[in-house]
Image (cartoon, rainbow, N blue to C red):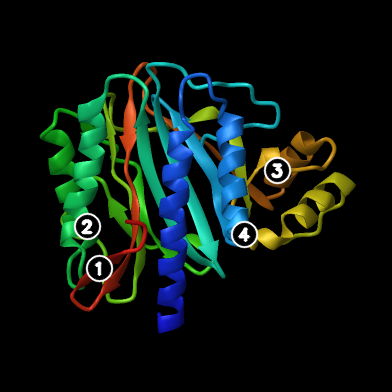
Protein backbone atom coordinates (compact mmCIF):
# COMPACT_ATOMS: atom_id res chain seq x y z
CA UNK A 1 0.00 0.00 0.00
CA UNK A 2 1.55 3.29 -1.10
CA UNK A 3 1.13 6.73 0.46
CA UNK A 4 -1.53 7.79 -2.06
CA UNK A 5 -3.67 4.75 -1.23
CA UNK A 6 -3.27 5.34 2.51
CA UNK A 7 -4.45 8.92 2.00
CA UNK A 8 -7.48 7.67 0.06
CA UNK A 9 -8.32 5.14 2.78
CA UNK A 10 -8.05 7.92 5.38
CA UNK A 11 -10.22 10.26 3.33
CA UNK A 12 -12.92 7.64 2.79
CA UNK A 13 -12.77 6.85 6.51
CA UNK A 14 -13.30 10.46 7.52
CA UNK A 15 -16.29 10.74 5.21
CA UNK A 16 -17.73 7.44 6.40
CA UNK A 17 -17.51 8.54 10.03
CA UNK A 18 -19.37 11.78 9.30
CA UNK A 19 -22.05 10.13 7.20
CA UNK A 20 -22.55 7.30 9.70
CA UNK A 21 -23.16 9.79 12.50
CA UNK A 22 -25.54 11.86 10.36
CA UNK A 23 -27.42 8.74 9.29
CA UNK A 24 -27.72 7.50 12.86
CA UNK A 25 -29.41 10.74 13.91
CA UNK A 26 -32.17 10.05 11.35
CA UNK A 27 -33.07 6.71 12.97
CA UNK A 28 -36.00 7.64 15.20
CA UNK A 29 -39.43 6.06 15.75
CA UNK A 30 -41.64 6.73 12.76
CA UNK A 31 -38.81 7.30 10.27
CA UNK A 32 -38.76 4.95 7.28
CA UNK A 33 -35.95 2.57 6.41
CA UNK A 34 -36.19 3.73 2.81
CA UNK A 35 -35.85 7.38 3.80
CA UNK A 36 -32.72 6.77 5.87
CA UNK A 37 -31.12 4.52 3.23
CA UNK A 38 -31.78 7.06 0.48
CA UNK A 39 -30.42 9.95 2.58
CA UNK A 40 -27.22 8.04 3.35
CA UNK A 41 -26.70 7.33 -0.37
CA UNK A 42 -27.35 10.98 -1.21
CA UNK A 43 -24.80 12.15 1.38
CA UNK A 44 -22.18 9.81 -0.06
CA UNK A 45 -22.79 11.09 -3.60
CA UNK A 46 -22.72 14.73 -2.44
CA UNK A 47 -19.26 14.15 -0.96
CA UNK A 48 -18.03 12.91 -4.33
CA UNK A 49 -17.42 9.38 -3.03
CA UNK A 50 -18.73 6.00 -4.17
CA UNK A 51 -21.12 3.65 -2.38
CA UNK A 52 -19.24 0.47 -1.48
CA UNK A 53 -22.46 -1.38 -0.61
CA UNK A 54 -26.10 -0.46 0.06
CA UNK A 55 -26.58 0.96 3.58
CA UNK A 56 -27.50 -1.92 5.87
CA UNK A 57 -30.37 -1.22 8.26
CA UNK A 58 -30.86 -4.40 10.26
CA UNK A 59 -33.42 -4.52 13.06
CA UNK A 60 -33.48 -6.48 16.30
CA UNK A 61 -32.53 -10.16 15.65
CA UNK A 62 -31.29 -9.26 12.14
CA UNK A 63 -27.53 -8.76 12.25
CA UNK A 64 -26.71 -7.77 8.69
CA UNK A 65 -27.68 -7.49 5.01
CA UNK A 66 -31.07 -5.85 5.42
CA UNK A 67 -31.89 -2.68 3.50
CA UNK A 68 -34.95 -1.00 2.04
CA UNK A 69 -36.73 -2.76 -0.79
CA UNK A 70 -38.31 -1.17 -3.89
CA UNK A 71 -41.69 -0.43 -2.22
CA UNK A 72 -40.58 -0.68 1.38
CA UNK A 73 -42.84 1.13 3.85
CA UNK A 74 -41.25 -0.23 7.03
CA UNK A 75 -40.68 2.27 9.83
CA UNK A 76 -38.54 2.23 12.94
CA UNK A 77 -40.46 1.73 16.18
CA UNK A 78 -39.81 2.35 19.85
CA UNK A 79 -37.99 -0.67 21.25
CA UNK A 80 -36.06 -1.43 18.04
CA UNK A 81 -32.33 -2.09 18.04
CA UNK A 82 -31.01 -0.85 14.70
CA UNK A 83 -27.64 -1.62 13.12
CA UNK A 84 -26.53 0.99 10.57
CA UNK A 85 -23.62 -0.33 8.51
CA UNK A 86 -22.27 1.78 5.64
CA UNK A 87 -19.45 1.49 3.16
CA UNK A 88 -17.97 4.19 0.97
CA UNK A 89 -14.96 4.23 -1.31
CA UNK A 90 -12.64 6.63 -3.07
CA UNK A 91 -11.17 5.06 -6.20
CA UNK A 92 -11.83 1.63 -4.67
CA UNK A 93 -10.27 2.37 -1.27
CA UNK A 94 -13.07 1.32 1.08
CA UNK A 95 -14.19 2.48 4.51
CA UNK A 96 -16.60 0.08 6.22
CA UNK A 97 -18.10 1.21 9.52
CA UNK A 98 -21.16 0.51 11.66
CA UNK A 99 -22.89 1.39 14.91
CA UNK A 100 -26.03 0.41 16.79
CA UNK A 101 -28.90 2.80 17.48
CA UNK A 102 -30.90 1.81 20.55
CA UNK A 103 -34.55 2.83 20.35
CA UNK A 104 -35.33 0.64 23.34
CA UNK A 105 -33.48 -0.27 26.51
CA UNK A 106 -30.38 -2.25 25.54
CA UNK A 107 -27.43 -0.15 26.75
CA UNK A 108 -25.34 -3.10 27.97
CA UNK A 109 -25.79 -5.00 24.70
CA UNK A 110 -24.72 -1.93 22.70
CA UNK A 111 -21.77 -1.49 25.05
CA UNK A 112 -20.73 -5.13 24.58
CA UNK A 113 -20.05 -4.86 20.84
CA UNK A 114 -18.49 -1.41 21.22
CA UNK A 115 -16.08 -2.48 23.98
CA UNK A 116 -15.30 -5.68 22.07
CA UNK A 117 -14.29 -3.56 19.09
CA UNK A 118 -12.08 -1.35 21.23
CA UNK A 119 -10.43 -4.44 22.74
CA UNK A 120 -9.61 -5.84 19.30
CA UNK A 121 -8.33 -2.50 18.03
CA UNK A 122 -5.95 -2.19 20.97
CA UNK A 123 -4.25 -5.43 19.90
CA UNK A 124 -4.07 -4.85 16.15
CA UNK A 125 -0.47 -4.67 14.96
CA UNK A 126 1.96 -6.70 12.83
CA UNK A 127 2.70 -10.15 14.23
CA UNK A 128 -0.63 -10.56 16.03
CA UNK A 129 -2.86 -13.36 14.78
CA UNK A 130 -6.49 -12.74 13.88
CA UNK A 131 -7.54 -15.36 16.42
CA UNK A 132 -6.12 -13.23 19.23
CA UNK A 133 -8.43 -10.40 18.21
CA UNK A 134 -11.31 -12.88 18.22
CA UNK A 135 -10.45 -13.98 21.75
CA UNK A 136 -10.50 -10.37 22.97
CA UNK A 137 -13.86 -9.80 21.25
CA UNK A 138 -15.35 -12.94 22.78
CA UNK A 139 -14.15 -12.10 26.28
CA UNK A 140 -15.60 -8.59 26.17
CA UNK A 141 -19.00 -9.84 25.00
CA UNK A 142 -19.30 -12.94 27.19
CA UNK A 143 -18.21 -11.03 30.30
CA UNK A 144 -21.28 -8.82 29.82
CA UNK A 145 -23.63 -11.77 29.62
CA UNK A 146 -24.10 -12.04 25.84
CA UNK A 147 -23.01 -14.27 22.98
CA UNK A 148 -20.60 -13.26 20.21
CA UNK A 149 -21.99 -14.16 16.80
CA UNK A 150 -19.65 -17.00 15.95
CA UNK A 151 -20.40 -17.32 12.23
CA UNK A 152 -19.86 -13.66 11.33
CA UNK A 153 -16.37 -12.25 10.97
CA UNK A 154 -14.47 -9.10 10.23
CA UNK A 155 -12.70 -9.09 6.89
CA UNK A 156 -9.83 -7.69 4.92
CA UNK A 157 -10.43 -5.02 2.30
CA UNK A 158 -8.81 -4.59 -1.09
CA UNK A 159 -9.38 -2.30 -4.05
CA UNK A 160 -13.07 -2.58 -4.99
CA UNK A 161 -13.21 -5.73 -2.84
CA UNK A 162 -15.13 -6.00 0.43
CA UNK A 163 -13.96 -9.44 1.46
CA UNK A 164 -10.26 -10.21 1.32
CA UNK A 165 -7.82 -11.83 3.73
CA UNK A 166 -7.72 -11.87 6.69
CA UNK A 167 -10.95 -12.97 8.36
CA UNK A 168 -11.21 -11.69 11.93
CA UNK A 169 -13.39 -14.02 14.04
CA UNK A 170 -15.70 -12.91 16.81
CA UNK A 171 -14.64 -15.86 18.94
CA UNK A 172 -11.25 -17.01 20.18
CA UNK A 173 -9.24 -19.42 18.10
CA UNK A 174 -5.80 -20.91 18.23
CA UNK A 175 -4.43 -19.13 15.23
CA UNK A 176 -5.66 -17.31 12.18
CA UNK A 177 -3.88 -15.07 9.72
CA UNK A 178 -0.86 -13.14 10.91
CA UNK A 179 -1.48 -9.40 10.61
CA UNK A 180 1.01 -7.60 8.40
CA UNK A 181 1.85 -3.97 7.76
CA UNK A 182 -0.27 -2.52 4.96
CA UNK A 183 -3.35 -4.68 5.49
CA UNK A 184 -6.72 -2.90 5.42
CA UNK A 185 -9.21 -4.65 7.70
CA UNK A 186 -12.80 -4.08 8.83
CA UNK A 187 -13.25 -5.39 12.39
CA UNK A 188 -16.91 -5.86 13.35
CA UNK A 189 -17.99 -7.58 16.57
CA UNK A 190 -21.62 -8.66 16.92
CA UNK A 191 -23.11 -9.35 20.36
CA UNK A 192 -26.40 -11.26 20.71
CA UNK A 193 -29.01 -12.13 23.33
CA UNK A 194 -29.82 -15.21 21.21
CA UNK A 195 -27.86 -18.29 20.16
CA UNK A 196 -24.86 -16.40 18.81
CA UNK A 197 -25.29 -17.85 15.31
CA UNK A 198 -27.07 -16.33 12.34
CA UNK A 199 -29.00 -18.05 9.58
CA UNK A 200 -30.24 -16.76 6.23
CA UNK A 201 -33.73 -15.29 6.23
CA UNK A 202 -36.18 -15.42 3.34
CA UNK A 203 -35.63 -11.81 2.20
CA UNK A 204 -32.75 -10.64 0.00
CA UNK A 205 -32.45 -7.04 -1.15
CA UNK A 206 -28.69 -6.92 -1.83
CA UNK A 207 -26.88 -8.57 -4.75
CA UNK A 208 -23.52 -8.51 -6.52
CA UNK A 209 -22.12 -9.68 -9.83
CA UNK A 210 -19.77 -12.66 -9.48
CA UNK A 211 -19.23 -13.76 -13.08
CA UNK A 212 -19.33 -12.57 -16.67
CA UNK A 213 -21.41 -14.83 -18.91
CA UNK A 214 -23.60 -14.41 -21.99
CA UNK A 215 -27.12 -13.34 -20.98
CA UNK A 216 -29.99 -13.84 -23.42
CA UNK A 217 -32.87 -11.92 -21.88
CA UNK A 218 -33.20 -8.15 -22.48
CA UNK A 219 -34.07 -7.52 -18.83
CA UNK A 220 -31.01 -9.43 -17.65
CA UNK A 221 -28.74 -7.53 -20.02
CA UNK A 222 -30.25 -4.25 -18.88
CA UNK A 223 -29.54 -5.06 -15.22
CA UNK A 224 -25.93 -5.88 -16.05
CA UNK A 225 -25.64 -2.58 -17.90
CA UNK A 226 -27.11 -0.74 -14.88
CA UNK A 227 -24.56 -2.29 -12.49
CA UNK A 228 -21.52 -2.16 -14.79
CA UNK A 229 -19.97 0.74 -12.86
CA UNK A 230 -20.25 -1.21 -9.58
CA UNK A 231 -17.17 -3.25 -10.59
CA UNK A 232 -18.50 -6.19 -8.61
CA UNK A 233 -19.47 -4.19 -5.51
CA UNK A 234 -22.93 -5.00 -4.09
CA UNK A 235 -26.07 -3.17 -5.20
CA UNK A 236 -29.65 -2.93 -3.95
CA UNK A 237 -32.73 -4.20 -5.75
CA UNK A 238 -34.19 -0.76 -4.93
CA UNK A 239 -31.66 0.94 -7.22
CA UNK A 240 -32.70 -0.93 -10.37
CA UNK A 241 -34.84 0.78 -13.00
CA UNK A 242 -35.23 -2.32 -15.18
CA UNK A 243 -38.80 -3.53 -15.72
CA UNK A 244 -39.52 -6.99 -14.29
CA UNK A 245 -36.27 -6.82 -12.36
CA UNK A 246 -37.32 -9.55 -9.90
CA UNK A 247 -37.63 -12.20 -12.60
CA UNK A 248 -34.38 -11.11 -14.21
CA UNK A 249 -32.52 -11.18 -10.89
CA UNK A 250 -33.73 -14.72 -10.23
CA UNK A 251 -32.56 -15.83 -13.67
CA UNK A 252 -29.15 -14.19 -13.27
CA UNK A 253 -28.65 -15.89 -9.91
CA UNK A 254 -29.62 -19.25 -11.43
CA UNK A 255 -27.07 -18.67 -14.21
CA UNK A 256 -24.33 -17.94 -11.66
CA UNK A 257 -23.91 -14.35 -12.83
CA UNK A 258 -25.17 -12.75 -9.61
CA UNK A 259 -25.30 -13.79 -5.98
CA UNK A 260 -27.78 -12.63 -3.37
CA UNK A 261 -27.16 -11.65 0.23
CA UNK A 262 -30.16 -12.78 2.33
CA UNK A 263 -30.79 -11.06 5.64
CA UNK A 264 -28.70 -12.74 8.37
CA UNK A 265 -30.56 -13.19 11.63
CA UNK A 266 -30.36 -14.84 15.03
CA UNK A 267 -33.41 -16.51 16.59
CA UNK A 268 -36.72 -14.58 16.58
CA UNK A 269 -37.17 -12.39 19.62
CA UNK A 270 -33.44 -11.91 20.17
CA UNK A 271 -31.44 -8.71 19.77
CA UNK A 272 -28.06 -8.22 18.08
CA UNK A 273 -25.72 -5.23 18.37
CA UNK A 274 -22.81 -4.33 16.09
CA UNK A 275 -19.83 -2.00 16.09
CA UNK A 276 -17.29 -1.65 13.29
CA UNK A 277 -14.21 0.28 12.26
CA UNK A 278 -11.79 0.04 9.35
CA UNK A 279 -8.07 -0.03 10.11
CA UNK A 280 -4.78 -0.01 8.24
CA UNK A 281 -2.08 -2.05 9.96
CA UNK A 282 1.07 0.04 10.39
CA UNK A 283 4.63 -0.73 11.44
CA UNK A 284 3.87 -0.41 15.14
CA UNK A 285 0.06 -0.59 15.43
CA UNK A 286 -2.81 0.56 13.27
CA UNK A 287 -4.56 3.63 11.87
CA UNK A 288 -8.31 3.60 12.56
CA UNK A 289 -9.55 5.32 9.42
CA UNK A 290 -13.19 5.60 10.52
CA UNK A 291 -12.70 6.78 14.10
In front of the other: 106 or 138: 106
Count of numbered circles in the view = 4
- Tell me the number on the disc at residue 286: 1
Q: Earlier in the sequence, mark 3 or mark 1?
A: 3
In this view, 118 is above or below 57: below
In this view, 175 is above or below 283: above
In front of the other: 147 or 216: 147
- Between the residue at mark 3 and the residue at mark 1, the CA separation in whole angstroms equals 35 Å
Question: What residue is rendered at 46% in x and 43% in y?
Answer: 22
- Between the residue at mark 2 and the residue at mark 3, the CA separation in whole angstroms equals 35 Å
- Between the residue at mark 2 and the residue at mark 1, the CA separation in whole angstroms equals 8 Å
Residue on which disc 3 sits: 239
Is 234 on the left-hand or right-hand side of 14?
right
Asked if labels 2 and 4 touch by Cβ distance under 8 angstroms, the answer is: no
Q: Earlier in the sequence, mark 2 or mark 3?
A: 2
Residue 151, image quadrant: top left
**SS class of the residue under badge 1?**
strand
- Between the residue at mark 4 and the residue at mark 1, the CA separation in whole angstroms equals 28 Å
Q: Earlier in the sequence, mark 2 or mark 1?
A: 2
Task: Residue 253 in the image: state x and y as whole percent.
Answer: 68, 44
Residue on which disc 4 sits: 232
Question: What residue is rendered at 34% in x and 54% in y?
Answer: 277
Asked if labels 3 and 2 touch by Cβ distance under 8 angstroms, the answer is: no
Residue on which disc 2 sits: 121
Task: Residue 150 in the image: state x and y as whole percent.
Answer: 28, 40
- Between the residue at mark 4 and the residue at mark 2, the CA separation in whole angstroms equals 29 Å
Amino acid sequence: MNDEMIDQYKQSGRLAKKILQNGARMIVPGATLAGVADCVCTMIHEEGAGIAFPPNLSLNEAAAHDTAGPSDDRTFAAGDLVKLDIGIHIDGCIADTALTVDLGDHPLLVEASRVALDSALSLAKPGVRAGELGAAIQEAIVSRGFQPVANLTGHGLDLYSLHASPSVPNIGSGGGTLLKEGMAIAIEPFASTGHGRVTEGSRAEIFSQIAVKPVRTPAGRKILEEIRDRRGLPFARRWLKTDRADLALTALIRQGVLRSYPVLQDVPGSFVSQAEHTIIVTEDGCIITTK
